[in-house]
Amino acid sequence: MTDTKTFHLPDLGEGLPDATIVEWFVKAGDSIRLDEPLVSMETAKAVVEVPSPVSGKVLKLAGGAGEVVVTGAMLAVFEPDPNLPQRAEGQDTGHHHGDHAPAKVVASDEGGELPAQPAPSEARGGDAGTVVGAMQSSDAVRSEQAISVGGIKAMPVVRALAKKLGVDLARVRATGADGTVTLADVKQAAADPSALLPSPPGRGAGGEGTAEAARRPVATSAPAPSPQPLSRGERGSERTPVSVAGKPMRTRPPGAASTAASGQPEQLKGVRRNMARVMADAHSKVVPTTLVDDADLHAWIGKQDITARLVRAIVCACRTVPALNAWFDGDALAVTRHPHVDVGIAVDTDDGLFVPALRNADMLDARGIREGINRLRVQVEERSIPASELAGYTISLSNFGMFAGRYATPVVVPPCVAIVGAGKLSHDVVAVIGGIEVHRRLPISLTFDHRAATGGEAARFLKALLDDMALPH
């Protein structure tokens, strides 16, 4: 009987219970050598390349692109080749789920190597890496050189972006070191298709993220299905609540007998999957209370950076009422008040919510705050932000009013005690001595964990914030 080796999904360094398949570099029946790229996986933060733990024939793969694999579950099954190099039995790979190869985290936008990040125990206060909220993280290899697949040298995060944008990597002009395709190259190609290189021989012009398309069989053409006639209520450019005759149409809720109106369930992946877990955990552990008021900006002189002023006002309020610039341990009923202020800035993306930390905000001036926020936003957009930058903030800010909404009940994510929400700027009529005036005002929501702070402390914190926001400059 032929010996087989089952490879289980390793701990990819994010401390998450699963990961999503982005792209297989092999298929069942292929041969692969030890440490050659096997698959790229998406976690809540990065695209992670997993190398092969053995040399031999691939017998079975866990699933297709987009499917979620639980950490520790079967990822692939191999038939080892005794004539090829193999990893010594018992050799440490740095993971903890059995037969694992060392996964490598990819997060550089230059196609180069991402310096190793400190272990979670070395992060400030011992807090683990976060995307939105706290999540445990294991010690893992966090560096990776760009690898060549199908003759194209690129990092897995670049391949994932190319697949998402429908860009054929074989036609992208590589500007990275040693002919490496970078994130900037892919974005440029997506923005300006005329800059693409000619299609290689035997390759279609369609956007394929990797050279895998060259190995796929070409489907024979088939006649397109005849269009189905529209129902009387669906004729024309859009469906209407009345029939063509002008009579109301009978409707019913979708059920077992009517599935046409039902959407297909879509499994959450990556950042959104982790966000769902963290929000549920926060809901079960925090006793939230929200205070709202308006910051009056009528006295402001000239144009000013509202977000920078918000950060400064939060710092001022933290100095006035340290109880809200703190972490709370619900199990031990212990509060840790911080002498520094690290503000978690909520960043909304198509992939989900990230909360990078603006470090030492209490030491920064307005320019330093703006430069720090811009740097964090770019790193989040490029998915190149280190895990250490998503860890250990002491209080957070959600500037949701950039889009819409006046007041909110932002979610406090443990171990933090408070979060400030800023609503949509408005011009309001306010009463003044002897008459009325129109003032520019910014709605503020303060949600805090009532286990760790009193209502009086929260009210004094909010007043200090509003007072600082009201200053002319």
Image (cartoon, rainbow, N blue to C red):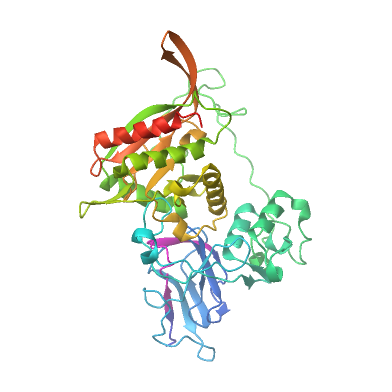
Q: How many discs appear?
A: 0
Nearer to the camera, 113 or 194 = 113
Nearer to the camera, 54 or 443 = 443
In the rendered image, residue 30, in percent from the top left (x then y), is placed at 57, 77
In the rendered image, residue 416, in percent from the top left (x then y), is placed at 33, 48
Image side of residue 252 versus residue 374, left or right:
left
Picture residue at 49% right of the left edge, 69% below the top: 116
- Up-down: is 360 above or below 237? below
Furthest-top residue in this view: 434
**Can I make out residue 167 in this image?**
no
Image side of residue 337 versus residue 270, left or right:
left
Image side of residue 336 versus residue 138, left or right:
left
Residue 13 part of the magenta-drawn span: yes
**Can I make out residue 25 in this image?**
yes
Q: Quadrant of residue 7?
A: bottom left
Residue 174 part of the magenta-drawn span: no
Nearer to the camera, 439 or 220 = 439
Q: Which residues are magenta?
A: 6-22
Picture residue at 49% right of the left edge, 20% below the top: 439
In the rendered image, residue 190, in percent from the top left (x then y), is placed at 69, 52
- Up-down: is 78 above or below 119? below
Furthest-bottom residue in this view: 83
Image side of residue 160 versus residue 99, left or right:
right
In the rendered image, residue 82, in percent from the top left (x then y), is placed at 50, 90
Picture residue at 66% right of the left edge, 69% below the top: 153
Quarter of the image with the N terminus is bottom left
